Image: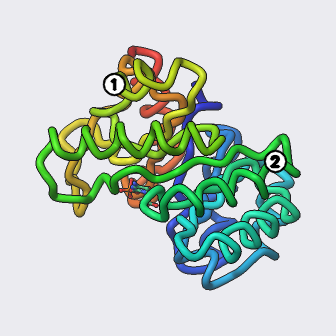
């Protein structure tokens, strides 16, 4: 299960990122580098983190097709294991991204469907997520980022091997903060989520390694 848990390293700088990596040690196999850390530290830190962990570069590219394809090429050259674009970018952008990613067969390319913080009603979010998942698959992407609540429908539509990566994970009465469509780790696994993204419930815990172990324990329960 620890191979399916991704910790979002949403911390200020390399010092905090490396401290969290060391604190989590081998409790998790994946680290997610997002906007905050990448803007602060850039690819150098990614090169360091990838020596010990698999890396999901979560920059949600959304631009003209040529620019996104070039960014995907840079991510592939950097050696990350997963990278994402925003499905809202449309068909031409998704196809250009997939074409660029094809040069890096070990790198998974996924599309954000609807942000788990989006306040739109659940049935609307599900319909849009399904439509964008189908488009992403037709364009040759490997999967999507979605909420746990959309996983089963996306798997039914796109097939079991189409990856689902789910943020918005909370358990034990934790504060949902800005997330709207949340679920706990066992529900995520039960729904068929391939990878669970957890940030603040681990980063802000008094004992982050214990919080990560608890997430893994709950995943096993699913
Ligand atoms: O702290 P928390 O567990 O809410 O962090 C969730 C992480 O997943 C954040 O890094 C956020 O940027 C990312 N994410 C998300 N929803 C998406 C895509 C990514 O929350 N649809």
Residue under label 1: 153
Q: Residue at x 44, y 48 (%)?
A: 198
Decide which of tag 2 and tag 1 comes sooner along the chain.
Answer: 2
Q: Residue at x 84, y 57 (%)?
A: 79
Q: Residue 22: where, in percent of width, then height?
A: 69, 55
Corner quadrant of residue 63: bottom right
Q: Quadrant of the C terminus?
A: top left
Report the front residue among 55 and 9. 55
Checking the image for residue 47, the label placed there is: none
Q: Residue at x 70, y 44 (%)?
A: 108
**Side (left or right) of 188 relative to 34:** left
Mark 2 Cβ inside 8 Å of ligand 1 = no
63 w.r.t. 169: above or below: below
Q: Quadrant of the N terminus?
A: top right
Residue under label 2: 102
Report the front residue among 202 and 210. 202
SS category of the residue bearing label 2: loop
In what quadrant does ligand 1 lie? bottom left
Q: Residue 219: where, in percent of width, then height?
A: 44, 23
Mark 1 surroundings within 10 Å by alpha-carbon count, few (fewer than 14), some (14 through 19), many (20 or more): some
Q: CA distance from mark 2 to mark 1?
A: 27 Å
Q: Residue 138: where, in percent of width, then height?
A: 57, 38
Q: Residue furthest bottom?
A: 40
SS category of the residue bearing label 1: helix
Q: Residue furthest left?
A: 121
Mark 2 surroundings within 10 Å by alpha-carbon count, few (fewer than 14), some (14 through 19), many (20 or more): some
64 w.r.t. 120: above or below: below
Report the front residue among 37 and 144. 144
Mark 1 Cβ inside 8 Å of ligand 1 = no
Q: Residue 40: where, in percent of width, then height?
A: 62, 85
Corner quadrant of residue 137: top right
């Amino acid at each position: 299960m620890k191979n399916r848990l991704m910790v979002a390293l949403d911390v200020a700088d390399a010092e905090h990122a490396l401290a969290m990596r060391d604190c989590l040690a081998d409790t998790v196999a994946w680290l997610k580098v997002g906007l905050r850390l990448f803007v602060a530290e850039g690819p150098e830190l990614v090169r360091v983190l990838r020596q010990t962990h698999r890396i999901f570069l979560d920059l949600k590219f959304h631009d003209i097709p040529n620019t996104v394809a070039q960014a995907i090429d840079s991510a592939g050259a950097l050696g990350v294991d997963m990278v994402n674009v925003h499905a809202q970018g449309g068909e031409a952008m998704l196809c250009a991204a997939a074409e660029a990613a094809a040069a890096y067969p070990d790198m998974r390319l996924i599309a954000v469907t609807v942000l788990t913080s989006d306040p739109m009603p659940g049935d609307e979010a599900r319909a849009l997520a399904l439509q964008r998942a189908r488009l992403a698959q037709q364009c040759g992407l490997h999967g999507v980022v979605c909420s746990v609540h959309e996983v089963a429908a996306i798997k039914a539509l796109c097939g079991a091997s189409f990856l689902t990566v789910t943020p918005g994970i909370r358990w034990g009465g934790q504060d949902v903060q800005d997330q709207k469509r949340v679920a706990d780790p066992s529900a995520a696994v039960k729904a068929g989520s391939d990878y669970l993204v957890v940030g603040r419930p681990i980063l802000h815990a008094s004992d982050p390694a214990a919080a990560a172990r608890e997430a893994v324990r709950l995943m096993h329960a699913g």
